[in-house]
Image (cartoon, helix red, strand yellow):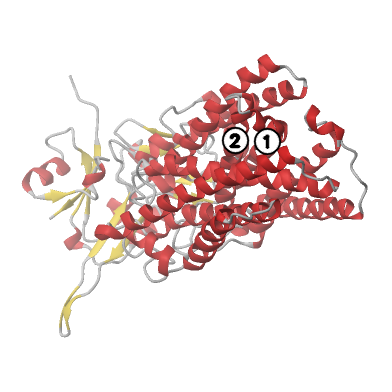
């Protein structure tokens, strides 16, 4: 196991994350005391806010990590086995963060017991919760298998994990896609789109983990590391390229024919309330700049990491915009709280603190695990 | 053999004067919290027609459509939403997790989160009144008799007769929800 150089930065990092967690715990406690209606800015028109967007972001990042990791221990691309343990560990922690976000968004999380006592098999949320619940179990066993070098078990759980990594985000997409009342979401586009974004998020996250793993420990990247990070950069570029076309066609379909309920949210994205998020957050930060960085012939691990960081930020904006835009169009005339014919939403301080807390939880737990567990493969232990 | 009841409301919106007595009666009967956006029923003021001095305006009262194929029922992960005798869509607050998916799935925006009960709430055609042989509060209170309530499976009920004699429509029929709130044309 690599020796971790003691740095004051490390203490500062943990202190910062602890502060975020304490603030989030305070916000969560406050929201349960005064009620979500008071603490959160969600309302009758926009009942799903930034916490749901965060849940989607973290849950699909988990699936993306698992998909990328499976290239190594399931599909036999040996370069990727270098990152398997870290990818699976981070996938577990992202999923736990995601569960935290959705758990704190629910008004009565303890009533979840009724998903077992009186399940509704026609509910997308039931399937999503069940699949992600089983998936978490599989990931934990897979991580155990990787840590104990149990190849047989890791191949079995890895294969199962791969299936669930495809199934889970597609079911998550169907939660939106099956909502007939919301034309912006409704259709078969959402499940496929969510899988593509899962691959972007997962690849970007694992590149960042690889980069910072070396950076924090002052380790030199050897030829194999550089080759892997270059390969991951190419995968990320390909996925971003595919995603650009998905976003493009989603906008064109929304504009074409001006279908009520689809047209207005798309207009809100391209020239309305969400346009700054869309153009700056999604398109420039999330797609164009990362793609340009990744297309450069002389790209370095640092520029690849920067592209990944920007793509991840863009993915968060994308999740936020997708969640909110679908709810902006009123379902009946003369609803309360309309501005220019659309609902509006901006997150409250409590919501923002809880989001920061969920992200900080995953980061805190991962950093701690890096310190406590042996996550390097045998090849790396010489360093 | 006697058929099961199938409750419906027929609305003649030409009679509506926008007094909102239905909303007030509903709030009182069902302990609906006061804010304007928490309501089980509502009256929509449609845009003014014509130009001064020849003006006209219509009002459209509405509520849960008690659909035969309710999307809110399909999406509820804990089966908190159910359909009772008479086709009334209800919510069991003890099972509701407050995920609000049903609020997003309902094409009529008929659901809201009730802070006081801590669960999603909606119109139940005043099911507690039906149990003792009374009609829904909104129907009873309307001074111009916009709403008519009854059993569509009874061919002699007032709602059956109204629908047989008059052209009518339902809201958003293209969604396949099969609503049981009928608007006379």
Is the C-beta separation of discs 2 and 1 under 8 Å?
Answer: yes
Where is mark 1, residue-wise?
A: A87
Residue depicted at x 75% and y 20%? A149
Q: Is residue A1 shown to the viewer in this render?
A: no
Picture coordinates of residue B51 (x, y %)? 16, 82
In this rendering, does residue A210 appear at all?
A: yes
Q: How many marks?
A: 2
Question: From the viewer's perspective, is A131 left or right of B56?
Answer: right
Rendered view: A327 above or below B86: below
Instruction: Please state the horizontal and vertical placement of residue A336, each as a whole percent of the image.
Output: 41, 65
Residue drawn at the location 67% of the way across and 45% of the way down: A207
Question: Image height check: is A140 above or below A225?
Answer: above
Q: Which residue is mark 2?
A: A68
Above or below for A177 versus B144:
above
Residue B85, image x, y percentages? 32, 30
Secondary structure of the residue carrying numbered label 1? helix
Chain for numbered disc 2: A
């Amino acid at each position: 196991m690599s020796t971790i150089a003691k740095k004051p930065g490390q203490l500062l990092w943990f202190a910062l994350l602890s502060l975020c967690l304490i603030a989030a715990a305070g916000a969560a406690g406050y929201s349960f005391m005064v009620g979500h209606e008071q603490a959160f800015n969600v309302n009758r028109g926009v009942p799903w806010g930034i916490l749901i967007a965060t849940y989607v972001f973290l849950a699909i990042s988990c699936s993306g990590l698992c998909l990328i990791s499976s290239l190594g221990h399931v599909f036999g691309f040996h370069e990727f086995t270098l990152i398997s343990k870290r990818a699976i560990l981070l996938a577990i922690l992202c999923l736990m963060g995601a569960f935290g976000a959705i758990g704190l968004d629910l008004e009565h999380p303890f009533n979840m017991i009724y998903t077992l006592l009186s399940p509704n098999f026609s509910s997308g949320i039931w399937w999503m919760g069940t699949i992600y619940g089983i998936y978490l179990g599989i990931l934990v066993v897979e991580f155990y298998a990787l840590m104990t070098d149990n190849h047989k078990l890791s191949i079995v759980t890895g294969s199962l994990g791969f299936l669930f990594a495809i199934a889970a985000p597609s079911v998550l997409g169907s939660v939106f896609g099956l909502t007939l009342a919301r034309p912006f979401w409704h259709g078969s586009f959402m499940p496929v789109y969510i899988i593509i974004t899962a691959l972007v998020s997962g690849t970007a996250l694992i590149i960042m983990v690889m980069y910072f793993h070396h950076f924090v420990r002052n380790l030199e990247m050897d030829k194999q590391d550089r080759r892997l990070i270059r390969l991951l950069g190419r995968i990320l570029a390909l996925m971003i390229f595919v995603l650009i076309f998905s976003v493009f066609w989603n906008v064109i379909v929304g504009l074409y024919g001006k279908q009520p309920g689809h047209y207005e949210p798309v207009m809100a994205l391209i020239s309305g309330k969400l346009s700054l998020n869309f153009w700056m957050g999604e398109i420039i930060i999330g797609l164009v700049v990362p793609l340009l960085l990744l297309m450069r012939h002389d790209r370095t691990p640092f520029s690849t990491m920067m592209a990944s960081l920007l793509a991840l930020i863009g993915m968060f904006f994308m999740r936020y915009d997708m969640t909110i835009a679908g709810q902006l169009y009123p379902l009946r005339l003369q609803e309360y709280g309309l501005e220019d014919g659309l609902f509006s939403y901006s997150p409250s301080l409590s919501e923002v603190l809880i989001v920061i807390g969920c992200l900080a939880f995953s980061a805190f737990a991962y950093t701690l695990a890096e310190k406590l567990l042996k996550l390097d493969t045998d090849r790396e232990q010489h360093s | 053999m006697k058929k099961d009841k199938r409750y419906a409301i027929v609305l003649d919106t030409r009679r509506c004067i926008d007094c909102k007595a239905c909303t007030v009666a509903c709030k009182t009967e069902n302990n609906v919290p006061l804010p304007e956006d928490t309501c089980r029923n509502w009256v929509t003021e449609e845009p003014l027609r014509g130009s001064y001095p020849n003006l006209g305006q219509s009002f459209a009262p509405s509520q849960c459509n008690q659909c035969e194929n309710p999307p809110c029922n399909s999406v509820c992960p804990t089966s908190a939403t159910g359909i009772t005798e008479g086709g009334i869509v209800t919510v069991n607050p003890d099972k509701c997790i407050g995920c609000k998916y049903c609020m997003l799935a309902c094409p009529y925006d008929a659901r809201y989160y009730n802070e006081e009960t801590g669960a999603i709430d909606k119109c139940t055609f005043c099911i507690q009144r039906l149990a003792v042989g009374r009609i829904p509060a909104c129907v009873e209170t309307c001074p111009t008799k916009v709403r008519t309530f009854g059993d569509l499976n009874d061919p002699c009920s007032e709602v059956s007769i109204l629908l047989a004699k008059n052209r009518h429509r339902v809201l958003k029929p293209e969604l396949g929800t099969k609503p049981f709130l009928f608007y006379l044309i």
